[in-house]
Amino acid sequence: EVGAFEGQASESLVLHQRVGYASVYRIWQELKRYLDLFGRHASISMKSVAELYEVWCLLEVRRILLNLGFVEKTAHRAAFKKNGLEKNLVDNFGAAFMLERADGIKIRLAHEPVFSRSNAPDFGEIYSWTTVQKPDIFLEATFPNQERIQWIFDAKYRVEDGSDGMDRAPDDAINQMHRYRDALIYINQANDGEPEKSRPILGAFVLYPGWFAEENTRNPYQEAIAAVG
């Protein structure tokens, strides 16, 4: 049976001897004393790789926008609830960024916005007429003429092997993108003053950790993207 370790505990000599690691070593000592004091009652917040990948994708989209010349105007931090050392996102309160470029285009980048039919129909808003929809990443561009275009990105930390040997997104993830495009409805005011419904999502894309040499290889989904977005 596996029992308690009764040997001599050892730590990295690098942490002891190198000046550059002094602050890391100090924090580790504080954490170790906390764990020793509370024993099994102490828990450290651990996130799955899938959760971290989703947040990373959001920040990567933001970085791409900044590289395209957009400047961040405002940012709404995600709301957290804390239980001891454990931190979790409060439902329906994700991060959001507002960006703007010199040509007048404004961008809203939101993490897990919630679309439902709670107060529809209001003009100029997007709703889900059937069930609540909560995509991972929502990107909306507003042009100087007030025209708005929306895109959806969903992070999936899964890869499937294609028949051509290339990394593919899971089929159910692609089907989910079609669901988002079908379920989300935009309410526009028609000429007669009545509400007019349309589907506003220009494109819905799966973000998955596949790999291919994009300089030498064509995106395996390029034809589908060109055909149906």
Image (cartoon, grey):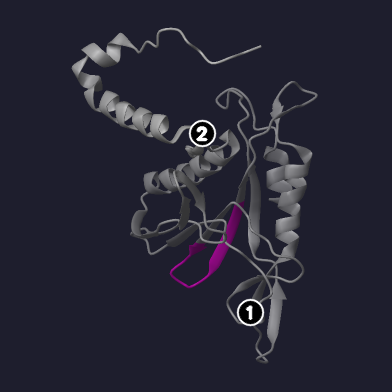
Is residue 227 located in the magenta-colored stretch of the structure? no
Identify residue for label 1. Answer: 188
Badge 2: residue crowd in 10 Å (few <14, some 14–19, many ≥20)? few
Look at the image and tell me in which quarter the N terminus lies: top right
Residue at 24% x, 28% y is 23
- The amino acid beneath tag 1 is Asn
- What range of the chain is rendered magenta? 141-152
Identify residue for label 2. Answer: 40
Residue 118 left/right relative to 99: right
Residue at 53% x, 70% y is 147
Depth check, mark 1 against mark 2: the one in front is 2
Rendered image quadrant of residue 121? bottom right
CA–CA distance in space, label 1 to label 2: 56 Å
Is residue 150 located in the magenta-colored stretch of the structure? yes
Please, what secondary structure does the residue beneath circle 2 have?
A: helix
Residue 229 is situated, as x and y percent measured from the top left of the image, at 68, 50
Please, what secondary structure does the residue beneath circle 1 have?
A: strand
Instruction: Point out the residue furthest to the right here.
Output: 163
Q: Nearer the viewer, residue 192 or 95?
A: 95
Rendered image quadrant of residue 127? bottom right
